[in-house]
């Protein structure tokens, strides 16, 4: 919170005016104590006498050089003028300490007067709630010279320390906004007239920060013309490349008319008034902060802030050369640790007060920081990868929200729900844009459904399925194929029923039908099986229904709504997925031909022939990253069943009872004869399929429900059977239609990087909160459309919701801080 305290002395009264917030204001009138001015003058004389006399001879070479400024004294960066009489018999240190004590006692006694109670209380209570910046404006100059920085306002009511800065009476409406520099912080160090001084300490202190600062020194050298130096300094200040920091060391003094002088060479001075146009150019080019490590800088600071510079550090009183070195070194060390200028100045003052009070008494009272109330304290930005990384890290609340998003992206039920919603959106997008497949469905689904059950006495008890009924379906399929003179040499029939239970009265019928189908039509017959534990359960061997030399098995276990692909590096050596075997057989019709006389394992012969022929299908298997993700119940990069395709483009439905009627219509016969794969399975009742000890039905995926509504198919509106999912799997394998979802966890990680980048570099270019919100909404919608189209054109399914939420978590707080 920003508070402004204006103090103006009118004759013997001081007017205090505290303003903050929306024109809130407190005023007080306090008599100005005459002893306070006396105490200040006594301290001022003691201060100058100590630093002229007590430290004489302690400044190295500088002590032996005559000071060109009469009365300034050895090694004082001060203005000319005689003050006091020197005598070596006085204990100057004790004299100064006593004078400081009297001054501060009188000063604080005055500030504790009852008239100021409301102001002190208001500031203290505010400091308990949030950090307080207090900007102090003093008029006239005599009031500004007092050590206001020692006023511990918050101590009386137990509030936190209040950060006090000074500001001039006249200020620009807003400070000049620095353009900012890239790379190292650029510093222009002007070293003035060194007569009686020694700037080696200043040079060493600045050069110690070479790794952070790009420093340019300019100053007088013996024999150099003063007028030429004046021109060079002015032109360097206005360098188009710009400066971040302006530093001056040397003699300076106050001057009301020209706002102060800095001495750049013997008998050569520059006024702030003369520097004004060059300083304005420097501010436009990025000048942020100025430090005058010289004497009596009150009018200099006032003038620079009034010109538009946001912050200036000065010495209000004459400063000894050694004190200037000690202050600068500590100040720069704090800046090197990336403290801001205000904190660095406070740290330097604490060092002078607590650790150097015996050597440099009262020196801590001298430095002051002038700031514009709308400015941000200058600091040296951190460089390197650590700082860049810190900018990309989320805040505390953002980290909590992101943690929740990351957790959601790992929970399988959440992933399945989001994937279902994503496929529904994809189905709607396909329908709206007309991007539907025009190929003939390769699968015919002969479905043993509820109407079939009602018409067939053998299906009264449908679990387990009547093997005699299955035999009748195989015989009728063989008859239809025999009626067509143009039928292919072989056909592929998959039976999605688990025939593990013996049916002594019915198994001979099915066994005969199976043998007849292979012997007469060379049919590829594939029976389903399942894994229970580590054991593969398939057709009951005692029933003698099939032999692996002329028929095949495939397991139906697979993660829900994902494609079934081989796991091992060697394709189908011991086991193979049911849909994969069907698709492989459909692509290898006639190579080899199924026969009752075949001596080797038929499935292995099929796989070997497919590999020898270079069929792409044999190269489709589970990626290692998918296998690794499976250990953590993740489906990383595993192809899914694309329910965004309508069922009628994936398979044709034929009810089993229609197939067994005496006269089968021509359309049904055509579908059977042209099908790449014929699937026989249960649809619409819980006991259908092969899933042991559970229902083979699942709630209808939202995308399938959407297509059924569009097709006005309400026969199985609430469920999806396992054989229908297998039909999708076979279709995808035959059509090379592979949709690979990018893992939500990966997408969220990428979105976190994108969101952080936009928050750091993009939001600053947005013109206001409203524009930012609409842009964010537009980008989110645009990403959704791109991801929908990308799935169709590339087969990669990009998550939308969680990545979008991640970007909003990073970007929306930044946008909300913008002005409306």
Image (cartoon, rainbow, N blue to C red):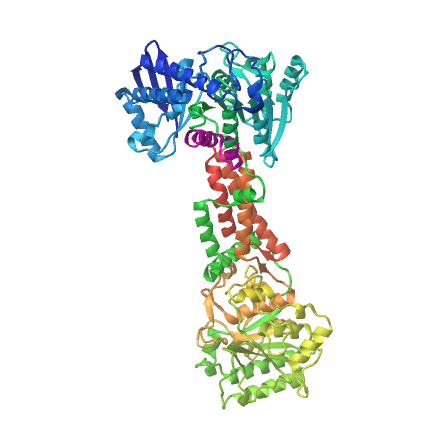
Quick check: 279 above or below 668?
Answer: above
Q: Is residue 451 left or right of residue 431?
A: left
Residue nearest the observer in this picture, 655 or 529 = 529
Quick check: 458 above or below 268?
Answer: below
Residue nearest the observer in this picture, 385 or 314 = 314
Q: Using the rendered view, name the quadrant where residue 607 is placed.
A: bottom right
Residue at 56 percent across and 31 percent down: it is: 205
Quick check: 700 above or below 96?
Answer: below
Q: Using the rendered view, name the quadrant where residue 589 is placed.
A: bottom right
Residue nearest the observer in this picture, 249 or 766 = 249
In the rendered image, residue 478, in percent from the top left (x then y), is placed at 62, 81
Residue at 44 percent across and 53 percent down: it is: 404
State whether residue 360 appears in this view: yes
Q: Which residues are magenta?
A: 331-356
The residue at the far front in this view is 89
Q: Is residue 139 left or right of residue 336?
A: left
State whether residue 176 appears in this view: no
Quick check: 540 above or below 674?
Answer: below
Residue nearest the observer in this picture, 447 or 761 = 761
Quadrant location, the N terminus: top left
In the rendered image, residue 142, in percent from the top left (x then y), is placed at 40, 14
The residue at the far right in this view is 613
The residue at the far left in this view is 114
In the rendered image, residue 438, in percent from the top left (x then y), is placed at 64, 60
Q: Using the rendered view, name the quadrant where residue 555 is placed.
A: bottom right
- Magenta: main secondary structure equals helix
Task: Tell me, yes or no, whether the highlighted magenta stretch contains residue 332.
Answer: yes
Residue at 65 percent across and 12 percent down: it is: 227
């Amino acid at each position: 919170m920003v508070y402004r305290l204006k103090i103006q002395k009118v004759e013997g009264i001081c007017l205090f005016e505290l303003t903050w917030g929306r024109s809130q204001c407190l005023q007080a009138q306090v008599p100005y104590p005459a002893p306070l001015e006396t105490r200040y003058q006594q301290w001022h004389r003691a201060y100058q006498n100590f630093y002229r006399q007590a430290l004489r001879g302690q400044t190295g070479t500088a002590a032996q050089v005559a000071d060109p400024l009469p009365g300034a004294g050895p090694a004082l960066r001060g203005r000319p003028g005689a003050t006091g009489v020197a005598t070596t018999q006085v204990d100057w240190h004790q004299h100064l300490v006593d004078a400081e004590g009297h001054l501060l006692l009188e000063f604080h006694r005055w500030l504790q007067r009852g008239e100021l109670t409301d102001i002190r209380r208001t500031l203290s209570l505010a400091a308990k709630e949030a950090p307080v910046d207090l900007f102090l404006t003093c008029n006239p100059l005599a009031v500004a010279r007092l050590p206001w920085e020692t006023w511990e306002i918050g101590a009386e009511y137990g509030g936190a320390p209040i950060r006090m800065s000074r500001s001039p009476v006249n200020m620009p409406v807003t400070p000049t906004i620095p353009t900012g520099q890239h790379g190292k912080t650029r510093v222009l160090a002007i070293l003035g007239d060194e007569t009686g001084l020694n700037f080696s300490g200043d040079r060493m202190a600045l050069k110690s920060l070479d790794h952070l600062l790009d420093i340019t020194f300019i100053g007088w050298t013996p024999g150099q013309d003063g007028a030429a130096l004046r021109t060079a300094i002015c032109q360097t200040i206005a360098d188009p490349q710009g400066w971040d920091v302006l530093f001056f060391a040397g003699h300076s003094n106050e001057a009301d008319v020209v706002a102060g002088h800095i001495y750049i060479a013997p008998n050569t001075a520059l006024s702030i008034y003369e520097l004004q146009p060059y300083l304005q150019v420097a501010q436009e080019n990025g000048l942020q902060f100025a430090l005058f490590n010289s004497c009596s800088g009150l009018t200099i600071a006032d003038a620079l802030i009034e010109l538009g510079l946001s912050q200036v550090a000065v010495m209000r009183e004459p400063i000894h050369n050694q004190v200037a070195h000690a202050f600068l070194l500590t100040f720069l060390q704090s800046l090197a640790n990336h403290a801001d200028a205000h904190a660095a100045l406070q740290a330097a003052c604490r060092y002078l007060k607590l650790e150097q009070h015996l050597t440099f008494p009262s020196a801590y009272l001298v430095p002051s920081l002038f700031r514009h109330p709308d400015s941000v304290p200058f600091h040296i930005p951190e460089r390197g990868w650590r700082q860049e990384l810190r900018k990309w890290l989320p805040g505390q609340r953002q980290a909590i929200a992101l943690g929740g998003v990351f957790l959601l992206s790992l929970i399988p039920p959440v992933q399945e729900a989001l994937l279902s919603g994503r496929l529904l959106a994809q189905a709607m997008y396909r329908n709206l844009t007309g991007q539907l497949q025009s190929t003939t469905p390769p699968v015919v689904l002969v479905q043993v459904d509820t109407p079939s059950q009602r018409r067939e006495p053998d299906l009264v008890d449908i679990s387990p399925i009547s093997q005699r009924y299955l035999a009748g379906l195989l015989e009728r399929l063989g008859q239809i194929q025999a009626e067509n003179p143009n039928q292919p040499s072989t056909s592929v029939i998959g039976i999605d029923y688990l025939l593990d239970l013996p049916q002594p009265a019915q198994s001979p019928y099915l066994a005969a039908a199976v043998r007849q189908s292979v012997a007469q039509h060379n049919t590829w017959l594939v029976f389903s099986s399942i894994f229970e534990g580590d054991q593969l359960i398939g057709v009951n061997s005692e029933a003698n229904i099939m032999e692996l030399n002329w028929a095949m098995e495939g397991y139906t276990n697979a993660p829900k709504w994902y494609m079934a692909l081989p796991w091992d590096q060697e394709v189908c050596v011991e086991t193979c997925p049911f849909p994969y075997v069907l698709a492989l057989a459909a692509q290898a019709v006639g190579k080899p031909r199924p026969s009752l006389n075949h001596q080797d394992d038929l499935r292995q012969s099929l796989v070997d022939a497919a590999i020898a022929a270079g069929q792409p299908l044999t190269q489709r298997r589970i990626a290692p990253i998918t296998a690794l993700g499976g250990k953590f119940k993740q489906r990383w990069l595993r192809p899914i069943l694309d329910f965004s395709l309508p069922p009628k483009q994936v398979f044709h439905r034929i009810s089993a009872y229609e197939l067994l009627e005496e006269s089968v219509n021509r359309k049904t016969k055509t579908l059977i004869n042209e099908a790449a794969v014929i699937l026989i399975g249960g649809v619409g009742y819980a006991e259908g399929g092969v899933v042991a000890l559970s229902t083979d039905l699942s709630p209808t995926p939202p995308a399938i429900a959407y297509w059924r509504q569009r097709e006005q198919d309400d026969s199985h509106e609430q469920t999806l059977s396992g054989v229908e999912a297998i039909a999708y799997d076979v279709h995808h394998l035959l059509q090379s239609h592979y949709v690979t979802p990018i893992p939500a966890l990966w997408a969220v990680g990428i979105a976190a990087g994108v969101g952080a980048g936009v928050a750091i570099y993009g939001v600053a270019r947005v013109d206001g909160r409203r524009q930012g919100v609409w842009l964010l909404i537009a980008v989110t919608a645009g990403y959704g459309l791109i991801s929908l189209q990308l799935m169709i054109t590339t087969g990669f399914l990009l998550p939308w919701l969680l990545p979008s939420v991640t970007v909003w978590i990073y970007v929306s707080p930044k946008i909300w801080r913008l002005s409306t």
